[in-house]
Image: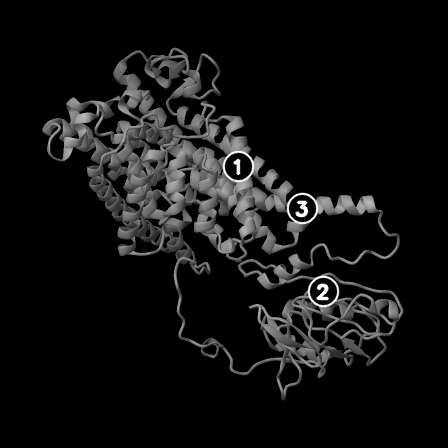
Amino acid sequence: GAAVMSAVTPQYSDLEPDQELRAPGANIFSEASGSRMEGEDSYGRSSKMTRGHSADVTKKSELYIGGLEELKVESQPEVKDFMTIDWTYYAEKEREWGKKAPKKGREPSSLIRYLHSTYDALQTWLALATAGFLCGAIAAMVAMGSDWMNDIKFGICAGRGWWITREMCCKDSADMLQCENWKTWAKILSVEVASTGQLVCYMAYVVIAVAQAGYAAWLCKTFAPYACGSGIGEIKVILSGFVIKKFLGAWTLIIKSLGLVLSVGSGLSIGKEGPFIHVCCCVGNVVCRLFSKYKTNEGKKRELLSCAAAAGVAVAFGAPIGGVLFSLEEVSSYFPPRTMWRSLFCAITAAITLQRWNPLSSGKLVMFEVTYHHQWKLFELVPFMLIGATGGVVGALINKYNVKFSKFRKSTQLKKWPITETMVTALITSLICYTVVYLRGSSMRLLSSLFSECKNSSQDIFEELCDADNGRQILVFLLLSAVIKTLLTIITFGQPTPGGVFVPALCIGALIGRAVGFSMQLLEEELGDRGVFASCLSTEHCITPGIYAIVGAASVLGGVTRMTVCLVVIMFEVTGGLEYLLPVMVGVLMSKWVGDAFGKDSIYIDLIRLKGYPHLDNKRDYSFSEKASDVMSSRELVVLSMQDHTVESLENLLEKTTFQGFPVVTNKAERLVHGYISRHALRRLLEQSHANSRVKPSTRIVFGASESTGLAEEGGVEGE
C-alpha cells in the first residue's frame, strides 16, 4: 500500500515496516519529470509543462491503501493570529468548490443534486442579504440609543415616556424650548431659582457624560479590547490578508455596539459613523460561519468583509453607492469585479433596512437634505478653493498631532489607566462644550444646522447662526468652536473607547466653511451688488453659507482620510445637492493636494504603522533595491528531497529548525523545485503516523502527486 501527503490534505495508511510513505508535495509551481503536456501559462502564452510528479497548485490528494480501507485526513493551512493567509491556497480551493467527488454508496437523486446546487449558488446572496439586514438593524438601534443617551444629559421626556428622545417627544411643538412634554433636570428636581437651575442642569450634564464615557471604557477593557477606536485601520490590514483573531468576533460586535451608544452619547469628540464599518465587518464575519462556502475559505471571507464594509458606510451616511466606492478605494486590497456588484447589493439591503427602522424620524435616507437649490456663482470658486486648502492643512495637523498624542499614550503610564483617561477627557469635554452653544448638542444636530439655510433652520440653539446684526460675534464663535473641536478630536480619537473621526472632521470643516460663507454674505451686504458681486443683481439669494459648510466638511474629512472620489459621492448622497457636486470636488481636490504636501498618508495608515501591523498601501508605489538573498537570515537553504527522507529524519529536521515550510526538490544535487510543503502539514503527517503501529521511524517518505481518485479502486497502485 502507499500513502500520499500534501500541505493541503495530508493522508496516511497502514504500511508494512520499512515500506515507503509516499507524499505528493502541494503548492507545486515548477515542472519535474515525466510526460509532456501543452497548455497556456498564467499570462496566456502557449507553453509546455512536464507532467509527472507535479500537480495543480494546492490540489487535494487522496489516500490509497492497496485494496484496504481508504483513510482521508482533511487539512488546510493553519490560520494563526498575526499571520498572513495563503491567498494561493484559498484561490485554488474556490476553483475546486463544487467539484467534489461523490461519496461512496448510494448516489443522490437528481432532485437532491438540483437542490444542493441551487443552495450552493444562493449561498453568496443569502449571506449578503443576511449581513445587510443585520447591519441596518444594528445601525438603527445604535443611532436611536446614542440619540437618547445624548438627550438624557439635558432631561427626560415626562409626557410620552422616559425612553423617548427629545426630538420625538417634542415633534408636535413649534419650539423645543417651549415643549411641555420635555422636562429638564432642574424641573425634575423642582429647582425654582433660575441661576440654581442652570447650575443643576450644568452639573447633571457633566456627571452623566463622565459616567457614560467611563462605562464605555470599562466595557472595552473588561470584555473586548479590540472594540476600542474606529477599527478602520485594522480592517484595511485584515482585508489585505492579515489575521487578527477576535477583532471581528461576536463579543467584539456586542461591546462595540453598546460602547458606541455610550461614548457617542457622552458627547466625546468622536463619531459612530467610522466604527459602523468595523461593526458591519464583525457582522459579516459572524455570518460567514453560517455558510460553508465562506466558513473555511479565508479568501472568500474577505470578499464578504469588503461587502460588509460598504454596508457600514451605507448605514453610517445613508450612502450605498459611496459605500461601494469607499470599500474599493480605501479598505480593500483584493476587490475582484464580482465584489462590486455584491457590495452594492449588500449596501442597498442595509440602507433599506435602516430606512424601514427610521431612526431619523423623517422616513428618508438622506441625513442632511439640502432644501435650498440656488445656483452658485463662478467667483465663489475662489473661496471654495480657499476652504479646500484650509481643510487640507487642518486635516494634516489633526493627523500629525493625533499620532503624536497616541505615541505619548502608548509610551507612558497613561496606557495603564484607560478608564481614568477616558473619564478625565469626558470631564474636560463636557465642561467646555456646555458653555459653547454650538458644541452643546449632538454633532449630527450641529451638522444639520450648519448645512441648512437660515430660514429653514428649526434648531432652537442655533438661531444665532443667522443673526447678521451680531456678525462678528458669530464669526468668532464659529472659528473658536472649530479650534476647540479640533483640539478635543486630537486628544480623543484613539482613546480606549469606541469612536471614529468622520463626524468630528465633518463638524470642524462645516464650522470653518460656515464662517467663510457667513463672512462672504456680510461682505456682499456691505459692498452691494458691484465688483465681484455684480452677478448677484439678478438673484434673490447670492451667498448661501450652507454651501460653504458642505464644502468645508468634505475638505477637512478629505484632509484627514485622503479620500477623493468616494468622499464626493458620499457628500452628494448625504445632502442630496446634485448642483453642488462641483464645489465639493474643488474643495476635495485642493484638500488632497495641500494635505499631500505635508504627508501622503491618511490617519489610518499612520495608526497602522504606530501599532506595527504589516500593510502595503495600494495607493503608493514601492521600489525595493534589495534581493531576497539580502534579507535572508541564513544562506544555507533547508530543502526536502523527494526520496531521501524517513519519518525519523523529518522529525529531527523539525526539531532543529523553525522555518514555516520547506521547498521540495528532485534531489539535493540538482535542486529542481518540485513543490512546497508547510511545516504545519508536515507536522500533521508525522503526528498521524505515530498513531499507525505499522509506520516505523525507518519508514521512507517519498514526495509526489496523486493523480485521481480512481486509483483507490485499482488497489495497490501508488499515486505519484
Residue 588: which quarter of the image? top left
Q: Which mark is residue 580?
A: none
Give the mark nearer the N terminus: 1 vs 2.
2
Residue 379: which quarter of the image? top left
Which structural element holds mark 1?
Answer: helix
Which amino acid type corresponds to the residue marked 1 in the rendered image?
Answer: Ile
Q: Residue tagged by mark 2?
A: 60
- 686 over 100 or under it: above or below: below
Depth check, mark 1 against mark 2: the one in front is: 1
In space, the residues marked 1 and 3 are separated at their CA atoms by 21 Å
Q: Which mark is residue 291?
A: 3
- In the rendered image, which quarter contains the N terminus? bottom right
Q: Which mark is residue 348?
A: 1
Contact (Cβ within 8 Å) of mark 3 with mark 2:
no
In space, the residues marked 1 and 2 are separated at their CA atoms by 38 Å
Residue 70: x and y, percent? 84, 65
- 86 over 479 or under it: above or below: below
Q: Residues within 10 Å of mark 1 (few under 14, many from 20)?
A: many
